[in-house]
Amino acid sequence: EAGVAQSPRYKIIEKRQSVAFWCNPISGHATLYWYQQILGQGPKLLIQFQNNGVVDDSQLPKDRFSAERLKGVDSTLKIQPAKLEDSAVYLCASSLLVIAGQPQHFGDGTRLSIL
Amino acid sequence: GQQVMQIPQYQHVQEGEDFTTYCNSSTTLSNIQWYKQRPGGHPVFLIQLVKSGEVKKQKRLTFQFGEAKKNSSLHITATQTTDVGTYFCAVGDSWGKLQFGAGTQVVVTP
């Protein structure tokens, strides 16, 4: 099966600019996650979708981050305006169902650098 | 939320040696997953543990869930250069949400 697709792979912007990331999950996977992984740390969940609804966005900095999954398939994550501390890899993951114990399948991520 | 501590943070291993990485929590866990992330890569699912005292093996990797379901371990025997990477434990909730530990970065010397 095709894996989780993410684009772009790399992005360099200046602080206060905006940026958007795209994710296409594995076909048929109802649940989609966005993570932020800062260098040397584990992935930190930003938002979890089931189909086109939000399950958990408690750790999403909503003053600058937004995400949507309008048709319940692909998703976009936006940062506006970007801050220096947003430099990280943004990982998208998907799983078949929104229940405990489902393995999550990750994309290659977008490496964001803020100048 | 649940806090999970992983130790050690860094492990330097000679090829052929064994090593163990640990994941500890102060609260009882419903389930725990382990992932491996190669340098420059993305996390890849290895295993899930659900039952108290559960032990699962994948070739040279042995995963264990503590009797009290508050800790877990990953033991690798006869380390190979292909074992290089960062190993994460991740604590799951009933909605499939995962909280990842900080990981154990493994470096293997030939």
Image (spheres, rainbow, N blue to C red):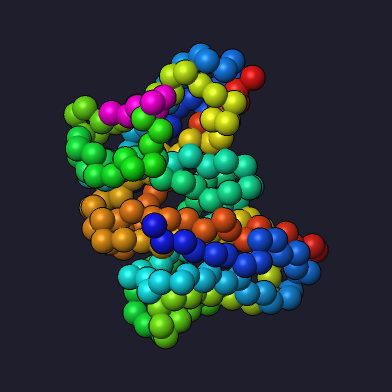
Residue B72: give x, y in percent of width and height: 49, 74
A64 magenta-colored: yes
* The quadrant where residue B84 appears: bottom right
Residue B32: give x, y in percent of width and height: 40, 67
In this picture, residue A21 sits left or right of residue A26: right
A44 magenta-colored: no
Quadrant of the image containing the N terminus of chain B: bottom left
* The quadrant where residue A33 appears: top left
In this picture, residue A33 sits left or right of residue B81: left
Query: What residue do we see at 69% from left, 77% from top?
Result: B18
Q: Is residue A55 above or below residue B11?
A: above
Residue A24 visible, this angle: yes
Query: What residue do we see at 33% from left, 43% from top?
Result: A58
Taking depth in this image into account, of B1 and A74 the one nearest to the observer is B1
Highlighted range, magenta: A63-68
How many marks on residues? 0
Quadrant of the image containing the C terminus of chain B: bottom right
Q: Is residue B61 above or below residue B91?
A: below
Question: What's the magenta bit mostly, secondary-structure-wise?
Answer: strand
Q: Is residue B80 above or below residue B37?
A: below
Query: What residue do we see at 50% from left, 51% from top?
Result: B43
Residue B82 visible, this angle: no
Residue A74: give x, y in percent of width and height: 29, 31
* The quadrant where residue A38 appears: top right
In this picture, residue A40 sits left or right of residue A68: right
Query: What residue do we see at 37% from left, 71% from top?
Result: B29
